[in-house]
Amino acid sequence: MGQRLAALWRRWLPSSLLGRVLLLTLLAMAAAQIVSSAAWIATFRAQQVEGLVATTRNLAQSAAATARFFNSLPTEYRHIVLDQLRNMGGTRFFVSLNDKLIAMKPLPDSDRKRLVTAEVRSVLHRRLGNQINLHVEFVDPADVRILNSELPLDALPPSWAHYALTLEPLNPPVLVTQIEVSEGEWLYLAAALPAPYVSLDDESVPDQQILFLVVMIAVLFPVLAWLIRQQTRPLRKLAKATRDLPLDDSQPPLAEQGSAEIVAVTRSFNAMRRRLHSHMRDREQLFRAISHDLKTPITRLRLRADLIDDDTMRARLEGDLMELELLVKGALQSLKDTDIHENVESVDIERLVARMAEAYRDGDEALVTVRGHSLPYRGKPLALSRCLGNLLDNAVKYGERAVITLEDSADRLRIRVDDRGPGIPESALPHIFDPYYRLDRQHQEGHGLGLGIARNIAHNHGGELAVDNRPGGGLRVTLDLPRR
């Protein structure tokens, strides 16, 4: 399971530093906002519950005071007081005296409802006595019934009940308290929960908080993206310069800008480039000096060999001199063909391969076939031409026919060269790229350097060269070149 999660993370994780920093920053911001919002919501809900309990406690105390007031009135005055309250208002309760307990559909149970209902009962029992018979319930305004006839609110004049029991357009729950003041007489008290505590359900996240999070992310994220992009721009330039690696003196050094770490890396890259350029120049001068110095003694030895009377000895000496000359030429050719004194530019591989294939013909018959298409590739044109030329030479020389297949994608360019030759023994595959290694000793041309040079050029482009035997016979050489 952990490996699958890690694989999914690597799959969806952006490859660029900018993308990764932005993603991690977004996750950090989201985590911080979730934690802070959770703490804020918990505090907000605690305050809501505390305020709701305090409000219902006040309602319960008022209900207890009203009940005690009605209990203190003579029986014949109670209805007179009720009529005056209905006509004049002035109380937060709708009050009536009924001869029975009125049953109504209560609101669904919730933690808040149980909490405040228990608080109301506690206050009433404490103020009116534990022996009192009472019924406390929260009811939706549409389900409220009043008077002995159990009329709904809409059936009564507005001045009678709507003033105390409605808070349009909120329509909060109605606290209905029914207290048995004497046998067959119930005091009915109903009051709507006052604002802002107008709900017994858990409060959702306020719209203002969600809007604040959205606005904050919408403002901070683009600014952060711009800042990170500015900071990583020197890294992108450094990556491009490392990939292209221009070694000629005409190229100026990279500008040392950005943070202290990036400046240090850029300065090290410039120093490395100078040392590498100096090394390549010294190597070129060394090989030129060796070539110049060896030509003279080889020529002198050939002249002296002609003076030897012994034909057998003369033939052996001339063979040794020829082999020495071939080794010198092969070393110089290796230096020339793997030389990277070339800047990167756009190369039309498809056109290059088609032009090279035209050179391999037997009369009107084409020896090389090209399949597939590719977009231009940024590389070193002469080096790529030498690489592909070596591959085609080997394919036509040992396989007589060759098929070049181009497979292009967003991240890599793959070039396959298939021939119809005898292939390579499995035991020889590990040594096929070794210098001067040749399978066919009968062919005197060549030095056994072609595949090694081609692989070095592939490595210089960040790619790879692979050689395998085809299942149907022949050899397959695959050149993989990355596009990044």
Image (tube, rainbow, N blue to C red):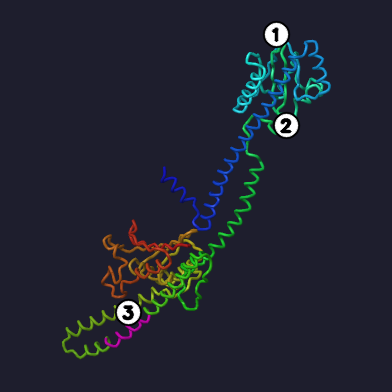
- Name the N-terminal-most of marks 1 and 3: 1
Amino acid type, label 3: Lys
- Mark carried by residue 183: 1
Number of marks in the rendered image? 3
- Name the N-terminal-most of marks 1 and 2: 2
Q: In the visual, does 293 lie left or right of 35?
A: left
Mark 2 to mark 3 CA distance (whole Å): 97 Å
Residue 109 at x, y percent in the picture: 61, 24
Mark 1 to mark 2 CA distance (whole Å): 37 Å
- Mark carried by residue 174: none
Q: In the visual, does 79 lie left or right of 475?
A: right
Residue 84 at x, y percent in the picture: 83, 19
Residue 322 at x, y percent in the picture: 26, 81
**Residue 462 sits above or below residue 288 on the image:** above
Amino acid type, label 2: Leu
> Which residue carries the number 2 mark?
170
> Label 1's element?
loop
> Label 2's element?
loop
Which residues make up the magenta segment?
284-297
Amino acid type, label 1: Glu
Q: Decide: marks 2, 3 in contact (CB < 8 A)? A: no
**Residue 482 sits above or below residue 290 on the image:** above
What residue is shown at x 26% (from left), y 71% (from top)? 441
What residue is shown at x 78% (from left), y 11% (from top)? 74
Residue 442 at x, y percent in the picture: 26, 72
> Which residue carries the number 3 mark?
329
Estimate how packed mark 1 is, as few (under 14), some (14 to 19) or many (20 or more) residues with alpha carbons within 10 Å: few
Image quadrant in which you'd find residue 390: bottom left
Question: Which of labels 2 and 3 is toward the front?
Answer: 2
Estimate how packed mark 2 is, as few (under 14), some (14 to 19) or many (20 or more) residues with alpha carbons within 10 Å: few
The kind of secondary structure the magenta stretch mainly shows is helix
Q: In the visual, does 410 lie left or right of 47?
A: left
